[in-house]
Amino acid sequence: MGLHFDVPDYKKLRVIIDTDAACEADDPFAIVHALLSPKLIVKGIIAEHFNEKGSSERSYSEIRTILNEMGMRVPILMGLEEALDENKDQKNEAVEFIINEAMKDDDKPLFVLCQGAITNVAAAISEQPEIKKRMTVIWIGTHGEAPCKAPFREFNAGNDIAAANLILSSGTDLWLVPSQVYTTVTIGIAEIERRIRPCGRIGEHLFTQLVTYNMSKYAGWTKGESWSLGDSPAIALALNPDCGHFKTVKAPRVADDTSSEICEGNPEIRIYTDIDSRYILEDLIAKLETYSDGSVYCKTESADQKYLYDRQNVDSEKPGFCSNPIIKTTYTADPAPMVFGDTLYLYTTHDEDRLENHFYTMNNWYCFSTKDMATWTDHGVIFSLDDISWADGRAWAPQCIERNGKFYLYCPVHKENGGMAIAVGISDKTEGPYKDLGHPLVDEGDWNDIDPTVFIDDDGQAYLYFGNPELRYVLLNEDMISYDEKVGIGRIPMTEEAFSKGSHMTGTSYAEGPWFYKRNGLYYMVYAAFSGEKGDGIQHNEHLAYSTSDSPLGPWVYGGVLMTEEGGTFTNHPGIADFRGHSYLFYHTGELPGGNLFHRSVCAAEFKYNDDGSIGTIAKCDGVYKITDD
């Protein structure tokens, strides 16, 4: 379920979050709070340094993890790696992003919420002074009103004193939350465990990263059983400036020991003297609880209708155009196209509206069909877990094929006694209904038995590939419901030459979701992939990649990236078909209202092969045009 209210458009704010997210454990709570607040339009999140080598990269990684766990897509910018230095070029993508957003002709106010050193904002003002009159900066930092002898070294101002003093003297609209205020936003770790940890994957992540930091040698300053979510006031004040009291005073100067000194030439700023910590905490927790209750969040009926209206407008502005997602009536994923006769049939999984156990909740398979790629017929549920007596969950990525007048739908499911296995549904019609074979076709008792892809070669031999983290195969017999047991289950060597270096478990990029086919004598293996290197500690989103071979069983040679990882979901899943003289890649994103990691939507993109059979990177797109006879 979602929140049953929306925020009037004229009350919404544009926000940029500047955060040293990997420094301590409170920043992630503030980031999540902002992302779950319908009043705040998060334009981007900047990874701020905390004066250690590689700290911006670490913050970037933590921001990315948060977005992955929430299934959200927001631009992430790499901030400056070091404190301000007049003798160095202080211009980078984050600084440019702040300037460009501030200079936009937009009637929604811009707030920059700073949860760390204020280097990037100071560099932006230094580069383009005009922006200081076009934004409000809320900063968690300093010891506040001068004079004030530093009771301890204030971390955020202390990590870049030059930037702090530039901001304080700049004349920008600055709301300051000093140390004696932000440290009062206190919550017990037991409360976090009881109320935040159960809130899905992001709740678990917030709790786990806090406990991990609390047990580390870096957390000697903490009290042991409680935590100060000191960065959260930046979010709360953007939501409600009256959730605390403030004074308007001359901005202080920050001394080398972070004491606040009087500086007569400085302009006036707003300094908060107290904050309503329970408002902050209860609002965060309530939004997390609502978000995790099915993970369909902040999408009211009116917002849904507006989204669909906008999509329809795309269609009306481009006659004969089918906008993405091509299936708009329900959450669909793992597209598997099959051309039969003059029709393209699309088999998909279905993400249920309501999650169970904060994980993919998938109980059945759908079929859709089209004769022109613009008009789609919904054939509804064609096969279900209810039809498979030995399965108890996880109706995952299928593929269908025809042979000898029958249709075979290969589907991975979770067995009642544990483990994944591949089921087969059989039908006399493309759109089903399908009847279960009665037992697993492939059952190794491990995670690898998922994502089957099936192909019949010119010589009549049928192949069924599948697997995560390895790519495996069986040689199907002509009956399509058994395989050559003498050959058994084959394993493709997981080498960098075949699948490139990557961060998945085998050390290659190959992850799951293989799609096997042949075109002009060349065999293709398209799959979901992970970039990076094994053990890099980064939770990457899946992108799509492909490999080719002159033989159906390899050796495979890596071809390149087919589609990049952006798209609002952790997963992606390819399906490729040639239809009426056009080539299409089917994939999924999180673009439908309420869409995210666990609520995906199938899209399509037309592409062309190069003369040598290679494929360039295919961009996610607005949709595809109707096929005509012209």
Image: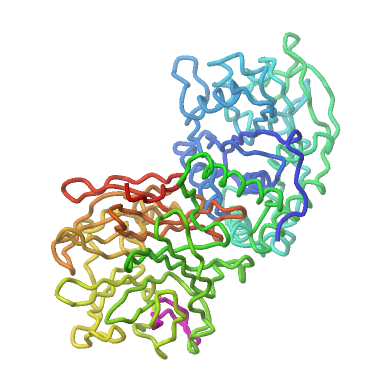
Image x and y of residue 339, in percent: 33, 65
Instruction: Give above or below for 75 relative to 472.
Output: above
Front in this rendered view, residue 108 or 144: 108
At 52% from the left edge and 22% from the top edge, which residue is drawn? Answer: 84
Depth check: give the residue in front, 108 or 206.
108
Write the residue at 49% across / 84% down. Answer: 391
* Outermost residue toward the top in this view: 265
Image point (44%, 18%), residue name: 88
Q: Position of residue 388 (x, y in %)?
A: 48, 86
The question of residue 81 being in magenta is answered with no
The quadrant of the rendering that contains the N terminus is bottom right
What residue is shown at x 25% (from left), y 80% (from top)?
489
Q: Position of residue 60 (x, y in %)?
A: 50, 42
State yes or no: residue 426 in magenta.
yes
Q: Which residues are magenta?
A: 411-427
Q: Is residue 399 above or below residue 45?
A: below
Is 437 above or below relative to 295? below
| Along the line of sight, the residue nearer the viewer: 119 or 599 | 599
Which SS does the magenta portion mostly show? Answer: strand
Residue 37 place in picture, x, y as percent: 70, 45
Left or right for 390, reference 451: right
